[in-house]
Amino acid sequence: MNRRLDQLHRYPFERLNDLLEDIKPATESGFIALSLGEPKHEMPAFLLELFSSEALIKKGMGAYPPTKGTGELRSAIAAFINRRYHLESAPIDAENQVLPVNGTREALFSFAQTIIDDENDSVTLMPNPFYQIYEGAAILAGSQPEYVPCTEATQFLPDFSQATKSTWDRCRLLYICTPGNPTGAVMNTEDMQALIKLSDIHNFVIASDECYSEIYKDETNPPPGLLQAAHEMGRQNYKNCIAFNSLSKRSNLPGLRSGYVAGDAELIDKFLLYRTYHGSAMSIHNQVLSAAAWNDEQHVIANRQLYRDKFLNVLEILNPVWPMTAPDASFYLWPTTPIDDTDFTRKLMQYTNIKVLPGSYLSRTINQQNPGKNHIRMALVATLDECLDAAHRLRSFIEKKQYLP
């Protein structure tokens, strides 16, 4: 048995289920889940039509899928990246700088197994709070996770000034998440370029989780990405830079399990070798659907507007009694709780039948500080009507101070 399995922490949603197991809501109001970042908007109609076509079904079932992905899909992904991040002078090459993956979750995990050599005393840096896959990937690859705090003082961005030279020297892999989960904070180009320069000095790889990149507040100001930052500093080979994205949030297709990895061709080549043995090829019909989704922007624009409408209306209800701010990107709210976040979560479930995620479950306590403590993550993924219903219940809960003993 792999001894490192014993080092893994229980997943946040398992802990949440245990936390709420004995709660019997004292209300007849229907259950509303704001805990899981699973989009509930409608699947794009043109993809639903394509999915149900007999030709696609036959094509998808009649051949082994290529691990590298079809040329059609890789071209669609490369075109999206080059268009979205303005990579005119050094466009991503569909042949050797793109791989389709079965959602970013499996790729963020397996990528660490490719990069990290467990014979070395390596460190993997990651934000805190964070997506727990980063931590598990590092541990099982034989690397020591090291957590970079994201607090209100740094606008919820990772404070890399706290990393020592020794840490940078031992770093082999750095995970960043921009826009951030759970805060929606967006790293600027200059900060990403500073990390790229550090990667030159200390020889580590930057893995940028950008799966919330297409849900943002200002239509004229999309969040920058790691490849864009590299491109703007003249790094045409994207050395040490790998970006991850998926269709789960962008196109409301979490069940399709479809995403991409793109960037440094040398790293992509090694990751492809790993994946050839890993047995992780995306099915043909998913590849066809994915290519169609990456090639279309109109459904994504409409999707963003749905989230803007929810933020606008929900915050109008809540802010008079519980001030909070819409993030620059993503579909999360990250408010401060008036009591301990786990106690607040239990009380909220008891009195409102609304399920949220305690912030401390998304963070690690380092030097007696947990940057997620006294926060909750609320995912505005349900319909507008459900989100408004939840907002009214939350307002009543706060006004009545039902969170108090």
Image (cartoon, rainbow, N blue to C red):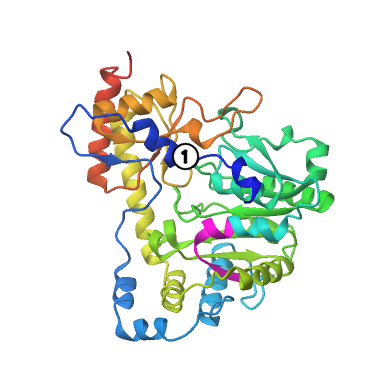
Camera-nearest residue between 74 and 152: 74
Q: Is residue 354 magenta?
A: no
Camera-nearest residue between 315 and 365: 365
- Drawn side of residue 148 relative to residue 302, left or right: right
Q: Residues within 10 Å of mark 1 (few under 14, many from 20)?
A: some
Inspect this view and state whether residue 292 appears.
Answer: yes
From the image, tell me which residue sits under label 1.
Answer: 12
> Which residue reaches farthest left?
28
- Drawn side of residue 391 relative to residue 198, left or right: left
42 is higher (above) or lower (below) than 168: below
Quarter-wise, where is residue 351 in the image?
top left
Image location of residue 139, percent across then percent down: 65, 46
Q: Secondary structure at mark 1?
A: helix
Image location of residue 92, percent across then percent down: 64, 71
Quadrant of the frame with the C terminus: top left
Q: Tell me where the magenta segment starts and ends, as one range.
A: 98-108
